[in-house]
Image (cartoon, grey):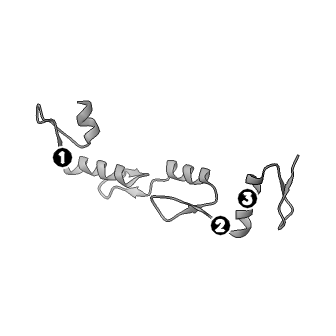
Amino acid sequence: QKLFSCHVCSNSFSTKGSLKVHMRLHTGAKPFKCPHCDLRFRTSGRRKTHIQWERPFQCTLCEKAFNQKSALQVHMKKHTGERPYKCEYCAMGFTQKSNMKLH
């Protein structure tokens, strides 16, 4: 049973939340901003999909691209050879602190 009607186009929805999301089509509202780029989305689900699949952070030295700036920064250490995290027992170097801790 569809209880919530759009006053603009007369579409009906079974929940108030569905009507609220639908109304964004008419108003143009896109309240969900990607934290990595300037794109905005009508629903949090579309933003989540964008973040998961879009890869706006491209390595300038190879073809790899990433969905987070921090992942690109870690990747760049492979090109530079930088290993800033050193094991205090054997001095082995790592590109990420988490890998050093696992070691």
Q: Are marks 3 and 1 in contact (CB under 8 Å)?
A: no
Instruction: Tell me the quadrant of the picture where the C terminus can be found.
Output: top left
Report whether 25 appears left or right of 81. right
- Number of marks drawn: 3
Report whether 97 appears left or right of 70. left
> Residue 27's x, y, as percent?
71, 69
Q: Secondary structure at mark 1?
A: loop
Q: Are marks 2 and 3 in contact (CB under 8 Å)?
A: no
Give me the residue at 70% from left, 63% from top: 24
Give me the residue at 87% from left, 52% from top: 3
Give me the residue at 62% from left, 64% from top: 30
Q: Are marks 2 and 1 in contact (CB under 8 Å)?
A: no
Q: Secondary structure at mark 3?
A: helix
Q: Which mark is residue 84?
A: 1
Mark 2 lies on residue: 29
Q: Earlier in the sequence, mark 3 or mark 1?
A: 3
Q: Which mark is residue 20?
A: 3
Give me the residue at 83% from left, 62% from top: 6
- In the image, 76 versus 12, the foreground residue is 12
Looking at the image, the residue that sits furthest to the left is: 90
What amino acid is labelled 2 in the image?
Ala
- In the image, 20 versus 43, the foreground residue is 20
What is the crowding at mark 3: few (fewer than 14 residues within 10 Å), some, or many (at least 20)?
Answer: few
What amino acid is labelled 1 in the image?
Pro
Q: Earlier in the sequence, mark 2 or mark 3?
A: 3
> Residue 7's x, y, as percent?
84, 66
Q: Secondary structure at mark 2?
A: loop
